[in-house]
Amino acid sequence: MNYLKIALAFISKHLLIIHTGTLKAKATSAFFLGVSVSPIAWVVEQITNWSIANHEYILFVLGAIAIDHVLGSILHAFYKRDFTWKKNLQGLVVKISLAVAMGFLFEGVNNLIQEDSFIKNYLIIVLRLSLFLYPASSAFMNSSIITKGKFPPLGWINKVKQFNSDLELKHLKSEVEEEIQEIS
């Protein structure tokens, strides 16, 4: 809290000087404010640009977290009967925090490889898919428990588990797709 007071005092002081000081003092204060705030503005701009370019990806990951949260709440409240608000909110905060942190790191890996290549495209697919499947596979499991294994099919859940174990995309392909590729 002390840092917030210091920052507000700094900003207030320089804004006051800009409005009441001499021309030299106004220029100096404007410079100090600009230099101190510009890194923050740059970071916000970069995050905004990335968010706009990847809004569908963000929507699906956040949607998967929301669906997992609702299904998990139903599962723990009505089936396992061990629901508590504290554990519920802790689980939601942990899942969102991990998705944001790992999403940042995964995107960092993707941005380190500058040129377009098979490896970069593969990493983007695998890392984004693994981030999406973190909450989605939990939602699939919750749904399976609620429906007593009827939906989603256990075959799908097993494919997701296999993908999560070794990140091989082949586990998510169907046998029909493999046969079509062999014929082509």
Image (spheres, grey):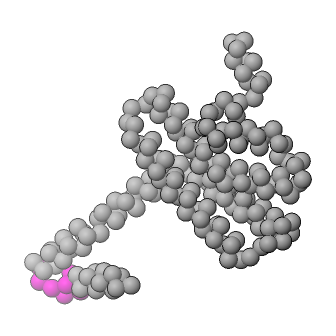
22 within the magenta span: yes
User: In which image quadrant can residue 181 be found?
Assistant: top right
Residue 151 among magenta residues? no
Q: Above or below — where is 90 with respect to 49?
A: below
Quadrant of the frame with the C terminus: top right
Q: Judge from the rendering whether residue 101 lies leftward or rightward of residue 87; answer left or right.
A: left
x and y percent of residue 176 in the render? 78, 23
Write down the quadrant of residue 7 in the picture.
bottom left
> The N terminus appears in which quarter of the rendering?
bottom left
- Please, what is the dominant secondary structure of the magenta stretch? helix
Closer-to-camera residue (103/53): 103
Residue at the (69%, 61%) spot, across then down: 66
Q: Is residue 116 in sight in this rendering?
A: yes
Where residue 75 sits in the image (x, y, percent)? 81, 64
Q: In this view of the protein, can residue 74 be seen by the observer? A: no
Q: Could you tell whether 16 is left or right of 88 in the image? A: left
For the point 30% across and 63% down, the residue is 39
Count of number-bearing discs: 0
Nearest to the observer: residue 149 or residue 5? 149
Which residue occupies 63% across, 57% down?
62
Question: Where residue 97 sits in the image (x, y, percent)?
Answer: 55, 63
Residue 25: % across, % down: 12, 80
- Range of magenta residues: 16-23
